[in-house]
Amino acid sequence: MTAADPSLIDLDRRGYTVVRGFLSDDEVKTLVEDYDASATDRAGRASPFGRRAPESSATKAVYQTYPAFPIPRAMLEMLTPKLEAFTASVRARTSLKSDLLTYGLYFDSNHLEYDWHQDTESFYRYQNPYHGLNLWIPIRKPIAEKTNLCVVPFDTLQARDPQARQLVNSGSRNFRVRDGKTLVAQGFSATEDEPASFVLSCDIEEIKDCPSLAAGDMLVTREDIIHRTQDGETHRLSVSFRVQPSTSVVTRKTFAATAHGHKLVNMLNDFTLYGRIMEAFRDRAEMTVGELQRYLTGEIPTEAMSPSKFLAGLLSFRKQEGLISPGAITLTDLVGTPCSCAACLPFYTALADCGLAT
Ligand SMILES: O=C(O)CCC(=O)C(=O)O
Ligand SMILES: [Fe+2]
């Protein structure tokens, strides 16, 4: 693809496009070998606050949190020139400002199948999903028509229901189809007890697109795209490179805002990383994505974190930003309606550790 390829315009209009044969066979092989070489390190590694459906609930476990594995820096560096050349062509052809390769993940269909969602982690970190890119590339792909990503084209969705406008540049939502309509809820995972924040008048299954990809083909999406795993029928491995807009602004208020109890659970899943964001905001209310990234990579060192320290810090940010009243703090101030699912229990333990009655 060249910078003149008109399909890049689809990123603004539809939210995604496909680039065939983006990675060479050698690059694919190197990534697969890297993933396989560290397979034993990953075996049985569970996040302390991880959420996982009971083994009995499906033919295989369906994870509801984020069992994706970081791509090592050396692999990112190997591909940086190629990824940067591509994102420069995106900036030249669209309104997107993505210019900073921030991280990469391996997604293995043996470990997960995701239901409909807008991404959570990159939204919490970088706050600008319209300008964030997900470069999603299968590297082990037994059957082109299977185990891809399904996406909902933004132009079709907005033509069906103009309310979908509010999903542009949003993140951390889940979607459930009921009786020809789509329920939109906050948070990463769809649990039946979560109230929908609004209802789209169409069925996103009817308008979805699931481009068939071979190993090395690339699905390029904005990070606000609504997407899900197509199926778990084949053992597919993919890489997902995340590119952010370095000059866009992130604010302490957005970081600290209470969206949902599950948001805190997700942050506690990775309190070291989110603790770095907290430290970055300690003395200022906003910064650019580029500056934030220097904290996230450890280039600017920060103090060690613990779950309790993280929660205490979050509480003080919320007071500072006027998100909660300065008086007594209740659990509801912190998480909204408490979640009673078993997976959230460790979270409530951490709350008790930081002195909050549950
Ligand atoms: O690889 C998958 O099936 C899910 C990937 C995903 O949700 C993502 O890249 O954000
Ligand atoms: Fe995702």
Image (spheres, grey):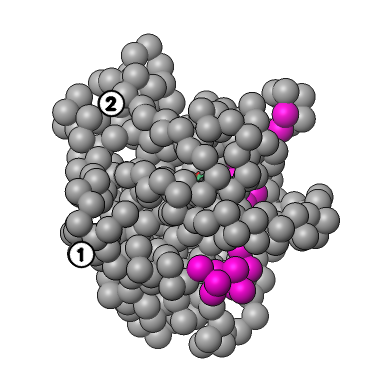
User: Which residue type carries mark 2?
Assistant: Leu
* Number of other residues with Cα within 10 Å of mark 2, as a class: few under 14, some 14 to 19, many 20 or more: many
x and y, in percent, of residue 105 in the image:
57, 57
x and y, in percent, of residue 223 in the image:
37, 51
* Number of other residues with Cα within 10 Å of mark 1, as a class: few under 14, some 14 to 19, many 20 or more: some
Magenta stretch bounds: 60-79
Q: Which residue is mark 2?
A: 200
Q: Quadrant of the N terminus?
A: bottom left
Residue plotted at (32% across, 44% down): 16
Instruction: Report whether residue 255 is seen.
Output: no
Q: Which residue is mark 1?
A: 92
Q: Are marks 1 and 2 in contact (CB under 8 Å)?
A: no
Circle 1: element type: helix
Taking the image as shown, residue 255 lies to the left or right of residue 265, namely: left
x and y, in percent, of residue 283 in the image:
40, 85
Residue plotted at (49% across, 43% down): 188
Taking the image as shown, residue 357 lies to the left or right of residue 128, namely: right
Circle 2: element type: strand
